[in-house]
Image: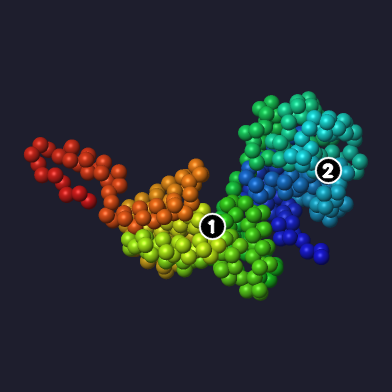
Amino acid sequence: MDYLVIARKYRPQTFTEVTGQEVVARTLTNAIKSQRVAHAYLFTGPRGVGKTSMARILAKALCCETGPTTEPCGVCQHCRMITDSGHPDVAEIDAARYNGVDAIRELSDNASFSPTLARFRIYILDEVHMLSTSAWNALLKLLEEPPAHVRFIFATTEVEKVLPTVLSRCQRFDFRSIDLDAIVKRLREICVKEQVQLTDAVLYRIARAAGGGMRDAQTLLDQLIAVCDGEVIEEDLNLLLGAARGGDLDLVVNDLLSGNASAAIETLDRIVAGGVAPTTFLEQLIDHARTVLLVQACGRESPAVRRLGTCTPALEAQAKLATPEKTMRTCQILIGSQLALRQGADPRLQLELSFVRIAGLGQLLDADTLLRRIERLESAPAGASAPHPR
């Protein structure tokens, strides 16, 4: 049972392999080339976008037998030990667990000793925002005047919790969420190596579900390969995500656009009875309505639409059936229901209310329409006939 999960198997090993963080990689490689490597770095950004991987690569670049180098060899003793998290001079510390002042004092005491094997002693502290104030205070002096052989790399998802006195002593790098196309490109490369065939529609749904995180996308891909029986289909992905089938989603949207709230609610009952959470289905509806709106505004071949996935014939027909104003109001109603759920509202009730409101958009006047009508009446010359409402 020596299986290695995809997220670890295909973890980046060089600066150029870190997807979506080209600016950070270029800055670090230039710093190494010009011998301007700082004593402390702070990597911040969402989860799963390459912060810890970049920290390991930087450690290998500084400790490699051919280094300091911008292209660590990956095969020397130092590179292999860092990859396996077993190098005596490169300490990876989980700050969420070792967040007390005693652990940091021990780290400070050890930092004064010269490296055992490498040319640097490197400390990688993950989730560093979890350190207590007393722990940070115990580390501040070392951060300000560290020994020449010591380098610190901090990683966090919540930089606002890090003390300003610490931020002023570090070079900060903000890691951004990875672009959808970049995630899909990397997933395609992995599928080729794993000898798995997935359609673009499935890959884009995986990337969208990952929310800009490469690790989450790779983990979901790993699960999808495990659950399928040789051939990956979109229904398997729906099973993993707890989502409704595309056919059911189109059926609900068609009923809402045609004003049939009763049929839409009946389909909703069947979907929820099949195990789909109302909150998950609401998110699907919002994404679907957003895609319809973008198709109406930009066309089906625009990059904005392609980033959201494949424009199916059913979705294109819905874009022609509804006016942009109605689609926009549909998005507003669904987003309003999502906000209500965060305040503790009943999910089923919110969906049912949304369905009734969306289905009745043709008969009911919303507040914006009433305001526009009043403005036209007030701006009309005295004695003139009122303009016909649109």
The picture places residue 335, in percent across and down from the top left corner, at 44, 48
Whether residue 324 can be seen here: no
Residue type at mark 2: give it: Val
The picture places residue 192, in percent across and down from the top left corner, at 66, 68
90 relative to 47 in the view: left or right: right
Residue type at mark 1: give it: Ala
Of residues 202 and 62, which is closer to you in this image? 202
Alpha carbons under labels 2 and 1: distance apart: 45 Å
What residue sits 10% from the left and 44% below the top? 385
Q: Secondary structure at mark 2?
A: strand
126 relative to 304 in the view: left or right: right
On the image, which quarter does residue 235 sit in?
Answer: bottom right
What residue sits 62% from the left and 45% below the top? 46
The mark that comes first in sequence, 2 or 1, is 2
Disc number at residue 277? 1
Q: Quadrant of the N terminus?
A: bottom right
Of residues 131 and 245, which is closer to you in this image? 245
**Neighbour class for label 1 at 10 Å: few (<14), some, many (≥20)?**
some
235 relative to 189 in the view: left or right: left
The picture places residue 195, in percent across and down from the top left corner, at 68, 71
On the image, which quarter does residue 150 sit in?
Answer: top right
Residue for badge 2: 90
Q: Secondary structure at mark 1?
A: loop
Disc number at residue 309? none
Q: Image height check: is 80 above or below 154?
A: below
**Neighbour class for label 2 at 10 Å: few (<14), some, many (≥20)?**
many
What residue sits 31% from the left and 54% below the top? 361
Q: Image height check: is 248 above or below 363?
A: below
